Image (cartoon, rainbow, N blue to C red):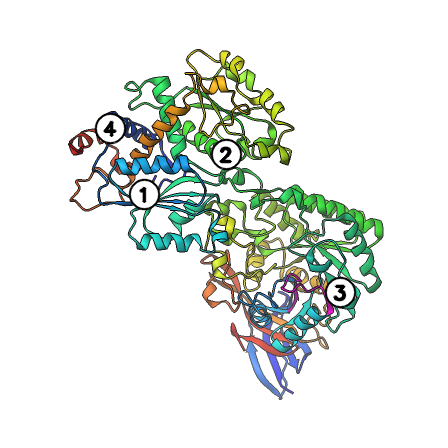
Amino acid sequence: MSKTLIRGAKVLGGESQDVLIDGGTIAEVGPELWDADVTRVVEATGKILLPGLVDLHTHLREPGREDSETVLTGTRAAASGGYTSVFAMANTFPVADTAGVVEQVWRLGQESGYCDVQPIGAVTVGLEGQKLAELGAMHESAAGVTVFSDDGKCVHDAVIMRRALEYVKAFGGVVAQHAQEPRLTEGAEMNEGVVSAELGLGGWPAVAEESIIARDVLLAEHVGSRVHICHLSTAGSVEIVRWAKSRGIRVTAEVTPHHLLLTDELVRSYNPVYKVNPPLRTERDVMALREALADGTIDIVATDHAPHPQEDKDCEWAAAAMGMVGLETALSVVQETMVDTGLLDWAGVADRMSFTPARIGQAEGHGRPVSAGEPANLTLVDSAYRGPVDPAGFASRSRNTPYEGRELPGRVTHTWLRGKATLVDGKLT
Amino acid sequence: MQRHLISAADLTRDDAVLILDTAEEMARVADRPIKKLPTLRGRTVVNLFFEDSTRTRISFEAAEKRLSADVINFTAKGSSVSKGESLKDTAQTLEAMGVDAVVIRHGASGAPYRLATSGWIDAAVINAGDGTHQHPTQALLDAFTMRRRLVGRDAGLGQDLSGRRITIVGDVLHSRVARSNVDLLHTLGAEVTLVAPPTLLPVGVDTWPCEVSYDLDSTLTKSDAVMMLRVQRERMNAAFFPTEREYSRRYGLDGDRMARMPEHAIVMHPGPMVRGMEITADVADSDRCTVIEQVTNGVSIRMAVLYLLLGGNEPAVAHPSPTTTLTTRRSAPTSELRTTEEK
């Protein structure tokens, strides 16, 4: 079995340590390690060693939209960004609402070898919000689904949402809600506020998100279930989740990197690369989200990686698709907005991007401490690097990043999936 | 303002006054037996209309033809998406045929801005109305009409609208005319008041450079011009207001209300009017209502914009200079216009 020695890395940003990987496992962590059988030494002095990142919210597009992304290209993008586990959203064609489709996605992930893929099952048949999908069958399939979501659409019917929350308790599942009141967001194209009023674009009001979150935390309390809130985007949503947690309601929440950095002022360019759902909000929202991620009100960062082909963005705003790719820039954006601002240390980053998402999604073997005996799912980051984002270098099949040309800190140089290097010196293996 | 006209907000006070002054020169041409200038001879303008608008399209076409431009009309019903061809491909196809300017009307807010800034084409872009965003030539023709009526045809030359009180009434939320007018009238020094039910005002309107009122009667007596916006009947189906009659009672302009306006005050409407809804027939047909004048003035304004953007005062044999900006062309082209006029 091959042995790799990572030398002098700051484990979770702390003391410099050597880490010895033996096969798929971390054999030893300590100062000045040596082993005669080491086949590869990685000089990591000054770099940050993190547990492999876990993304609870990825769109891999396969089956159906292989022109945007496939499981293979998406997992390569994930490895490039330091991820060892991604949760694939259900809004594929066909929708992942049966055991057959989730098993297909799961199997494609196994074959890719770059990153573990855990399929998310749809809550309702065809994401239509009317009839529960066979949640139990998806759980019992080879894919072992535990997270269910109609992401892209809101489970807006209160009774369906209540039943879903109750039903998945039987096998310890969790419903991840895309909080968007549909009637309040008819024709919505961007955040409703000063900028939308000027630009004449249909408004997506904060209350459309907040009212659903308020309803769902109360439903979760009433039926004693846990609920997860996808891509929380407003200061008001933070307040509601904070209140719910203080009441003991079992709610977890995620924020995307782009909602931590970008605001609706960018929409003044009418460049659809900034078109995303939920929309970019205001500076005040961005600051509230950062603070909430720092104090734990928001539990995790999830990318909402949403690849789209060029023609779906190279057009007028109204005609453009919503979404941004994110896997390959997520850690840099988190460093820029949370670490370099002093809001979060690297141990905090490990918690928000690995430990906690793995726990919410029950991703076995992921989000584990960097210590002897644990699976060797690891990410090495050169946090001193700073440079412009170049989408031409992306592993993703799509290029719809809002960060093109923007200088961001941090670069993932190595990723190991159960001891196998998937990324070496910034290059995929 | 650069080489495109996308938003009324992009115009400086001097840009706007230059356009109004130039339009007065153009209007004089219309009074002559031969209403044609050779200034855009050899230049090609395409009217790219993704949204039905016969009035605006004909107005631009008349302006282009009076300036002797070659005119191509391209009308595509529905959006580029439903048509299957992208805006980019359509624009590039037209440019490949050698157009110097694109006059675009599009249902999507921002489509003209995208056309002008994405590097898809090199032609000058003139916004003829985009979604609920902007309709700058409408605002210019409205300002032109106000200046003529409130300041005077000759007295107005070189002047703006300082201190004039303009009230805009109706569906501000869905109106590109209201947005363009607020921007331009503010630039020209007018005091603008928007009047509408709260449901038909956008969230964020409080940051606009104007006053907002929910009460028509209290603002009428303090208005030099009252601009009524069209209110589509289908809006009541989306609960913006209860019934057509209630809207008319609270926000419609009838003879009684018009009588309470100052004697010199005018009534304006961008058209098409919905008689019986926002305006009664007796008001629409009264001589205080400028709706027909606005149509006439629209041609003069569009001639002025095309002329200034396309470097129309260059001698016909000289190299065209489509990159010339309005600001570098500050001098009014009166004398040249007269000398180049066709005999």
Helix, strand or loop for disc 4:
helix
Q: Is residue B145 left or right of residue A427?
A: left
Find the magenta span and give its range.
A85-99
Residue B228 coordinates in the image, percent (x, y):
49, 25
Residue type at the position of mark 1: Arg
Residue B71: x and y in percent read 30, 43
Q: In the rendered picture of this protein, how many numbered marks are placed on residues?
A: 4
- Look at mark 1 in the image and give the residue it sits on: B3
Q: Is residue A389 visible?
A: yes
Query: Spatial distance from mark 4 to mark 1, Cα to Cα?
Result: 25 Å
Residue nearest the observer in this picture, A34 or A146: A146
Crowdedness near tag 1: few (<14), some (14–19) or many (≥20) residues, C-alpha within 10 Å? many
Q: Is residue A228 left or right of residue B81?
A: right
**Mark 3, residue position:** A146
The residue tagged with tag 3: helix, strand or loop?
Answer: loop
Q: In the figure, residue A351 lies in which quadrant?
A: bottom right
Q: Chain of mark 1?
A: B
Q: Which mark is residue A255?
A: none
Going by the numbered disc 2, the residue's amino acid type is: Ser
* Predominant secondary structure, magenta span: loop
Graded by Cα atoms within 10 Å as few (under 14), some (14 to 19) or many (20 or more), the crowding at tag 3 reads: many
Counting residues from the start of the chain, the first of labels 4 and 1 encountered is 1
In primary-sequence order, the first of circles 4 and 2 is 4
At 64% from the left and 33% from the top, the residue drawn is B239
> Are the residues flagged by discs 3 and 2 in contact, CB closer than 8 Å?
no
Q: CA distance from mark 3 to mark 4?
A: 76 Å
Disc 1 versus disc 3: distance between alpha carbons? 57 Å
Location of mark 2 (residue)? B175
- Secondary element under disc 2, as helix, strand or loop, is loop
